[in-house]
Amino acid sequence: MLLRLSSTAIVGSALLAGSAQAQIPQAPQIQSPQSQAPQLQLQRAQFRSLLKMPDPRGEFVRLCAPHMVGRWAHPEAVCGCLHDYAAATVEDTDLREALLRGISETGVPTIETEWVPPSKQSQIGATFTKIAKPTLQCMFEPAK
């Protein structure tokens, strides 16, 4: 039984791989730069859709919003605002990613020391100082 299942899976994979290769377009003919631009944009869009890379802000809001439900009337707006301010205010990539992770996992600005390289752990306090006012604005000031 296991042998049949394995054989079926291997044959199916080979067939799918063969059909995927058959869909690769031929090399394009030499075209003017003006006619290539729309084609390149289309190819890039198709490539991105194949990868299905999520929008980082949208993914953040999706993870953050459930923690905000019941606290705020518009949790998605609060999460989006927190993301935008953190992305704009915190220059260091490691600290910004740790802060965004903390917000998306808890709904409040949080940074666990193990999320940050030891050389940057001393900067956690300064990061919270930078983000304090924008966080309060996101949570308590009405959207304008």
Image (cartoon, grey):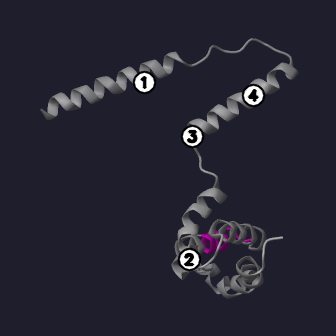
Residue 6 position in % (x across, y down): 22, 32
Q: Which residue type does callout 2 highlight? A: Gly
Residue depicted at x 75% and y 28%: 40
The residue to which callout 3 is attached is: 51
Q: Name above or below for residue 44 compared with residue 138.
A: above
> Which residue corresponds to the image point at 82% horizontal and 14% vertical from the top-left?
31
Identify the mark nearer the N-term, 1 or 4. 1
Instruction: Identify the residue position indicated by label 2 in the image.
Output: 70
Label 3 vs 4, first from the N-terminus: 4
Q: In 3D space, how far apart are the residues under numbered discs 3 and 4 (Cα atoms)?
A: 17 Å
Instruction: Name the residue carrying label 1.
Output: 17
Q: The residue tagged with tag 2: helix, strand or loop?
A: loop
Callout 3: few (<14), some (14-19), or many (20+) C-alpha neighbours within 10 Å? few
Which SS type dominates the magenta stretch?
A: helix
Please report the bounds of the magenta region as a residue range.
Answer: 91-100
| Quadrant showing the N terminus | top left
The CA distance from mark 1 to mark 4 is: 25 Å
User: Badge 1 local density, few (<14 within 10 Å), some, or many (20+)?
Assistant: few
The amino acid type, in three-letter code, at marker 3 is Leu
Secondary structure, mark 1, is: helix
Q: Residue at x 37, y 20 (%)?
A: 15
The span from disc 1 to disc 2 (Cα, nearest Å) is: 48 Å
Q: Which mark is residue 40?
A: 4
Magenta stretch containing residue 93, yes or no?
yes
Residue 105, above or below 39: below
Counting from the top left corner in percent of width and height, residue 35 is at 83, 19
Do the CB atoms of the residues marked 3 and 2 lie less than 8 Å apart? no
- Please tell me whether mark 3 sits on a helix, a strand or a loop: helix
